[in-house]
Amino acid sequence: MMKPGSALLSSYFLAVALAMLLPLRSNAGPLDQCGQVVVTVADDWNSATGRMQIFERERGKPWRPVFKQSLPVLLGKSGLAWGRGVYGQSEKAPYAKREGDRRTPAGIFRIGKVLGYDPKLSVNPAYPYHQVGKWDAWPDDPGNPYYNQHVVVDPRRVPKWFESQKMRHNDEAYRFLIDIRHNSDPPVPGMGSATFFHTRRGPTRPTYGCTTMSREDLLRFMGRLRADKRPHYVVMPVVEYAKRQKGLDLPPMP
């Protein structure tokens, strides 16, 4: 039986414990537990080009660049728009990411697995990898129940939508896809889908919202990814990045 005053005492200690935890939670940033970030900055909201660098750090130490020079990348044909990730979706800005707007999602996003045509990811065997087969799909139709999700369909019951949503096209630009977890947890119909890093189609050809680069740079990039460092992608116009650099503990601008 609880003694008189025990309930009051327990409530007191619970309140003290919560008071100690709340400042930690309110001050926690999206990159606090992250040891690897990929940063891309663009000149402005309407820019279709950017520069990318990978940064790494050990706990309690500053960010350090991985490559000697930043890598040139191509972005959405119409530029950037705030996307849905671990940071960005609640920001007020001239643009918010929508399906079909040809804008690259801006913000901070987790980096997921690599998907590719090859049997294994030779440049980085330890990183999570899925070989894309005949029945893999990634629907970009907001009306599809699997919108913005990787799904492997049952070949015995192939849905009508599969042909237009399948992943395997024997297209060298899509030989490797690195999943950018935009609008993924959970997906919201119409807020944008199928956002990846992949090989560019030409040195000046922008994308529909992905981040692309030369094949050589993509291989170098994939080779440096470390799942145990919880890699995240930070992509913003330079002005927005500069505003948030200190508050979000972002690395130096590439």
Image (cartoon, helix red, strand yellow):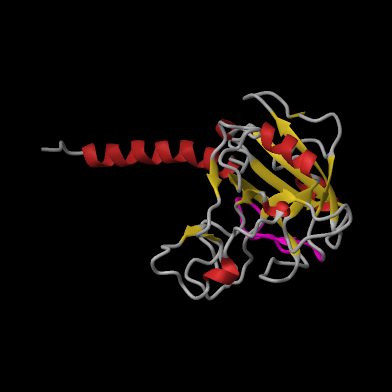
SS assignment for the magenta stretch, majority: loop
Q: Locate residue 210, reporting x and y percent.
A: 72, 56
Q: Locate residue 7, reporting x and y percent.
A: 23, 41
Q: Nearer the viewer, residue 208 or 187?
A: 208
Give residue 141's quadrant in the image: bottom right
Q: Locate residue 205, reporting x and y percent.
A: 85, 59
| 32 to 185, vertically: above or below | above
Q: Is residue 103 left or right of residue 140?
A: right
Q: Does the magenta portion include 83?
A: yes
Magenta residues? 78-92
Residue depicted at x 70% and y 49%: 197
Please state, as top left, top right, bottom left or bottom right, where the N terminus lies in the image. Answer: top left
Q: Is residue 89 left or right of residue 42?
A: left
Give residue 219's quadrant in the image: top right
Residue depicted at x 64% and y 52%: 87
Tally the numbered discs: 0
Q: Nearer the viewer, residue 1 or 107?
A: 107
Residue depicted at x 59% and y 71%: 164
Outermost residue on the left side: it is: 1
